[in-house]
Structure formats: C-alpha cells, structure tokens
Image: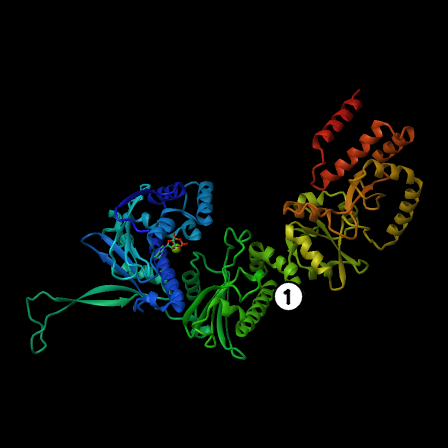
C-alpha cells in the first residue's frame, strides 16, 4: 500500500538498540559499510535477474545491471545506487525498519556478551549490513522503486530511533542510498577515513568487492589542457574537465585462470566477495573436470561455521554459473546434507541459463556434478587428516557434528566417512583419535571397540563401568555428542570389530581372569537368587533385571542397558527430542564384593518386608541413576531417604 502523506515511524526496539550501537560505535573498521551496501545492491540485482527469467516484463526494457558510486564534495554525500529489484513501501518497512532475521538478534546477544567492544568483526560476521551505514553517516536517505511498481518510496533516518517514509517518484527501478557523511568522513584531513575521496573508494572496492558480479562504477573527472587548432596548448587557459566513467572492480571470473596463476589472497577475496564472509576460508578446492559433464568448481570450507549452523534447517548451498554468467545462488541440490557447510561455485557450459529450481532437481547433469563434488571434498578431507592434522582438528571442531550426522543419514558415504571421524578417548586427554589409530593401539586379544556415552569427559570417566576397563588398561572411546551413539550404532562395526558400549550387556573381556570371574559371578547369582528377585520386585516398572556385576570395582551399583534396543543415553536424547516413549532396557548391576551388598543381604535375611530393605533398594537405584547423569524419578523422596539414613547412622 502506498501512502500519500509522509509517515513518521519508530524502529522496532531491537533495531533501535542496534542503531544506537552503530551510531556510537567505537568500531575502528567503519569502512566496511561500503562492502555491506554494495553486497546488498548485488543481492538485489541477483534477485531481479532471477525473477525476470520467468517474468521478462519486470525489467522494463532495462538490462543494465550496475552499481554507481557518486561522491559529492559540495553536499558531503556519498550516493550508492543500483538497478536491482528495489523495494515496495511495505518491504521497506519490513526490511529496513525491523529486524526479522534471527541473525541480528543473535548479534545483539553476542554484543551484550562482549560489551561494546566490537573490534572483532562482529558486524561483518552477522551481516547486519544496512545499518552499518550509520557508522559513517549523519543521515541516511533511501529512495527505491520495486521492479514493476509505478511509484517509488523515500525513507529517511538520522539513526535516532525514528524514520520517515513517503511515496515519491523514481524513474529507474532499483535503490539509491544517499549518505550524509559525518564530518570526519568527509574531510581531506583523514584521507583513509574520507569517503568522498575517489581513490580511497576505489581502493575499498578493490579490497572488499573486487569479484562482485556487477560493475561498480564511478565518475572520474579528468583535466585536459585546452588545445588550439594546431594541437598546441593555449597558455593561461584553465584546463577543461572531462568526465570518465570507470569500473572499479575487475569482475573477472577468477576460476577461469590456471590454478598456479592464482594466489591464496585472490581466492580469499573471491570467497569473501561471493559469500559475504569476513574471514579467510580454511580450505580452497579448485578443480576443472572434463568428462561426461564439463565444469570448473571452486569450493571453500569456511573457517567458522555460522553461529546458528546446527539449528538451521536450510543450507547455504552452491552458486551456479554457466560460462562465467551467474545463474543461481544457494543451489542445495548439489551437495548432501552433511556437507552443507561447504560454500563455493560450479561453472559449466552444460548448465542452462534459464533453469528453474524445479527443473534443477531433476537435472541428471547436476546429480553427476554433485556426486563428483562430494567425492572430491571427501578426498580433500582425507588428505587433510593425514597430512595436516592441526588443520583437520580445526575443521573437526567446526563441522565434526555434521560429518557424524552424515554417517547416520548417508548410507552411501558411510565407508569413507568413518575414516574421517575423531573421538576423544581414554588414551589421551588432548588428542582425538580415529578408529584406525584405536585399532593400531589395541591388543590382539581384544575383540571389540569399547565406547562410553555421556555428557562430558569427567562424567564418563567416573562411570562405575569404567573402573574395570581402566584397571585393565583398555582404551575406551568417549561419545560426548548427542549424535555420537546414533552414528556408532549406524556403523555397527569398524574393520570387523564391533563397537561395544561399556554400559551394555556383557563386557566380553576374553582373558583368563575374566573367565574365572564369570564362574564366580554365576555362583554368586545362584546363591543370591532370592535376594535378586526381591530387589527386582521392589523396583518393578523401573528395571527389567537385577544382576551380579562383573564390571564393578569400588562402586556398589551401576545401571546398564541390554544388548538390544536403545541405550540409556539415547533414551535421554530421544526424550529431549519429544520421543519419551522409547525406553532402554534397564539392568541394575550390583557389586557383590561391596559392603553395601552385605548390608542389603542381611536386611533381606532379617526381614524381607521391612521398610529399611525397601529403602535400600530404592536408594541403590537412585544412586545408579545419578551416576548416569539422570535424576531419580522422585528426587525429593530420594533426598528424604538419604536424610533418614544419615540421621539413623549418627544415632
Ligand atoms: P541482509 O543483506 O543480510 O539481508 P541487510 O541489513 O544488509 O541484511 O539488508 C536487509 C534487507 O534490506 C535485505 O535483505 C533486503 O531485503 C533489503 N535491502 C537492503 N538493501 C537493498 C537494496 N539495495 N535493494 C533491495 N533491497 C535491499
Ligand atoms: Mg546485506
């Protein structure tokens, strides 16, 4: 809806907060406002180009896609205009007046944590782009007309919490942003901070926006001497001024050059320009492929995952080009879900320029390219793991969870992915281990790969089930991520060695001492059959079985789950994900050599129906839960029983 009168509106509360931060920013790197505004202009042109594929009339016969920078000394303004898709009245209110994006809210929260010290490039990281204009401008005026709309919109703000908006005329489609620069940014006293200085602007475009796909142009005024008819300079005549339009960015598709002619810095700039990141990428994979489908690809692994990477459903995807011409952003069909952290582009003469997203999903060529990309990324990761472990560790920290998810969700890639997994283990407190290294260290007699699942290292290391394995010097993998146990279960085994939870079934320690112990346990079980049944009855509905343990050393009790079905920790995860119906088969194991066991036994023999015996059963079960990091079902009743016991013993 278009308003005839000028409206005065307030920014949304969060936006105000953000603006206030921008205006009073002590941020030193203010020049990035230009990068942000140019990248918005570039996005807007991508949008109109894509829309016009199906609606040619939107272009209004104007095929010119360009960004113009106009510094004006007289008015101390810097104008940035584009021929992008523009915005309607409501879009301006929505996009510029409110922060709809979760990213901006997260940005504000992060700022709160960091205080007002915004020196590290948080602004660039969170793409709070447009508002960065207020770091350098006293007043920002935005004049825009959406493609296909008869009327334009004029928006203006000094960043004080309010803005005005009104309808206006605008001839060409697109957006023009006029920055009334703050004095310090419009003065020749500080050339680097002067955003009217053409050479400074040119340098900033080279630095931040070199590979933006659209020409970024600026007028340069050239002085030429006035010549007479013979071509000789006329003395005492002031030179004439001619205006020359120059394109500041090279726009060269860097990937068409040979690999050995491209520097790391050029790759980094390309990456930052195309994907609006502020940090160099961790890894670049550049390849040219000739075969069934011909294509060139440059893939980047960002140094850091986006702050909301693991909460986000959608993925960023890959850019598609055909013969250097941009077709589409965020093509998610190319890479499997577990590689969604990889950014990059594919340029193929075989891609059609007029491809729609629907057609794309069915494209056999694209599927083939996707398969190849996946292979080459995996190969790269394999190389990194063996040749540059510190780098791989960094990658693992950021994206390990995604790779583990791949094991769980991508059957086809399991074989290769399992080699790329890293886990903490009892072997080292610092280094993570691969399965391969675990196998190399493992004694020949060991038949399974042991693991323990829990919340953190300390919790797992204190599990009563760990005691025996520690004593025997057997290495145990620690599964501390939610996805871990699901991934391990999906794998089942590695190099024919089964994965075995230390909290499940029997431990299968195939040595003579454990054979002996098994025999003793069998005898104890027989001797105490009635007691075990009584405990099981007391804990009806809570546990499936009570056993004499072979794995406990100093703890009186522990809780394990059966060989089949889900484990206790999986049960917890599923419950947190609103699947409370999946229950592990709980087995309570008792340490027959522990004092508590003797007391329990005598309580039972004195009077099997006494409240003391019942309390002991409940207390043991509660303890076992606590050691697994679970709460007793009725914590207050548990605490009361402990208090009663404490008081009794002090009599
Ligand atoms: P982001 O670019 O990450 O979305 P910005 O704050 O930079 O965040 O921009 C907010 C929104 O304003 C954009 O998503 C876009 O919808 C709109 N916008 C900004 N600049 C332009 C422009 N030059 N042309 C069209 N829309 C724009
Ligand atoms: Mg932006």
Q: Residue 250: x and y, percent?
A: 34, 68
State whether residue 196 is above or below residue 235: above
Relative side of 251 to 438, left or right: left
State whether residue 193 is above or below residue 640: below
Relative side of 131 to 494, left or right: left
Looking at this view, name the residue that lies furthest to the bottom: 291
Q: Picture quarter containing residue 20?
A: top left
Relative side of 23 to 279, left or right: left
Q: Residue 489: x and y, percent?
A: 71, 56
Q: Secondary structure at mark 1?
A: helix
Q: Picture quarter containing residue 629?
A: top right
Of 612 and 558, nearer the camera is 612
Residue 329 visible in the displayed image? yes
Of 71 and 194, nearer the camera is 71
Q: How is the image coloured?
A: rainbow
Number of numbered discs on residues: 1
Q: Residue 604: x and y, percent?
A: 89, 32
Q: Where does the C terminus fall, quadrant-wise?
A: top right
State whether residue 550 is above or below residue 251: above
Residue 528 visible in the displayed image? no
Of 112 and 353, nearer the camera is 353
Of 326 and 27, nearer the camera is 326
Q: Quadrant of ligand 1?
A: bottom left
Where is mark 1, residue-wise? Answer: 413
Q: Residue at x 91, y 28 (%)?
A: 606
Q: Residue at x 30, y 51 (%)?
A: 2
Looking at this view, name the residue that lies furthest to the top: 651
């Amino acid at each position: 809806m278009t308003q005839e009168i000028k409206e005065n509106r307030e920014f949304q509360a969060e936006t105000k907060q953000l603006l206030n931060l921008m205006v009073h920013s002590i941020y030193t790197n203010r020049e990035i406002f230009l990068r942000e505004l140019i990248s918005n202009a570039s996005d807007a042109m991508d949008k109109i180009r894509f829309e016009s594929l199906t609606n040619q009339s939107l272009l209004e016969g104007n095929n010119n896609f360009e960004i113009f920078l106009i510094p004006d000394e007289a008015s101390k303004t810097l104008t940035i205009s584009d021929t992008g898709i523009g915005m309607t009245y409501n879009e301006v209110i929505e996009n510029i007046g409110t922060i709809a994006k979760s990213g901006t809210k997260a940005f504000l929260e992060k700022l709160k944590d960091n205080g007002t010290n915004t020196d590290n490039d948080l602004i660039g990281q969170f793409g709070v782009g447009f508002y960065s204009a207020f770091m350098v401008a006293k007043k920002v005026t935005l004049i825009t007309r959406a493609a296909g709309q008869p009327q334009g919109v004029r928006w203006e703000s000094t960043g004080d919490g309010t803005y005005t908006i009104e309808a206006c005329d605008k001839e060409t489609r697109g957006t023009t942003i006029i920055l009334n620069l703050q004095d310090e940014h419009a003065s020749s006293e500080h050339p680097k901070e002067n955003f009217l200085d053409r050479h400074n602007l040119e340098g900033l475009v080279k630095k931040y926006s070199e590979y933006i796909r659209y020409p970024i142009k600026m007028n340069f005024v050239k002085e030429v001497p006035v010549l007479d008819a013979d071509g000789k300079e006329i003395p005492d005549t002031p030179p004439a001024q001619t205006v020359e339009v120059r394109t500041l960015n090279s726009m060269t598709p860097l990937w068409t050059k040979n690999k050995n002619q491209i520097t790391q810095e050029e790759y980094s700039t390309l990456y930052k320009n195309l994907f609006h990141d502020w940090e160099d990428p961790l890894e670049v994979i550049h390849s040219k492929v000739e075969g069934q489908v011909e294509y060139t690809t440059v893939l980047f692994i960002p140094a850091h995952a986006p702050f909301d990477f693991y909460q986000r459903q959608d993925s960023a995807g890959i850019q598609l080009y055909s013969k250097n011409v941009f077709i589409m952003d965020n093509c998610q069909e190319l890479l499997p879900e577990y590689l969604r952290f990889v950014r990059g582009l594919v340029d193929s003469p075989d891609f059609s320029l007029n491809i729609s997203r629907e057609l794309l999903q069915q494209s056999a060529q694209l599927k083939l390219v996707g398969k190849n990309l996946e292979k080459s990324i995996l190969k790269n990761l394999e190389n990194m793991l063996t040749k540059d472990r510190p780098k791989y560790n960094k990658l693992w920290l950021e994206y390990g969870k995604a790779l583990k998810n791949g094991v769980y969700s991508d059957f086809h890639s399991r074989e290769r992915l399992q080699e790329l997994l890293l886990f903490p283990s009892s072997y080292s407190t610092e280094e993570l281990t691969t399965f391969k290294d675990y196998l190399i260290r493992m004694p020949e007699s060991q038949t399974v790969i042991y693991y323990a699942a829990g919340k953190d290292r300390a919790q797992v290391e204190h599990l009563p089930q760990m005691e025996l394995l520690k004593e025997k010097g057997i290495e145990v993998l620690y599964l501390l991520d939610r996805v871990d146990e699901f991934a391990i279960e999906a794998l089942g085994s590695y190099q024919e060695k089964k994965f075995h939870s230390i909290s499940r079934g029997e431990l299968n320690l195939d040595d003579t001492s454990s054979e002996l112990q098994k025999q003793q346990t069998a005898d104890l079980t027989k001797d105490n059959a009635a007691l075990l049944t009584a405990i099981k009855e007391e804990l009806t509905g809570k546990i499936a079985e009570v056993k004499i343990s072979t794995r406990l050393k100093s703890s009186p009790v522990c809780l394990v789950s059966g060989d089949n079905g889900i484990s206790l920790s999986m049960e917890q995860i599923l419950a947190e994900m609103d699947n409370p119906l999946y229950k592990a088969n709980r087995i309570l194991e008792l340490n027959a050599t522990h004092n508590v066991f003797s007391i329990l036994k005598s309580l039972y023999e004195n009077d099997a129906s006494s409240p003391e015996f019942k309390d002991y059963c409940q207390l043991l079960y509660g303890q076992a839960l606590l050691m697994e990091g679970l709460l007793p079902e009725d914590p207050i009743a548990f605490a009361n029983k402990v208090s009663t016991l404490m008081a009794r013993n002090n009599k």
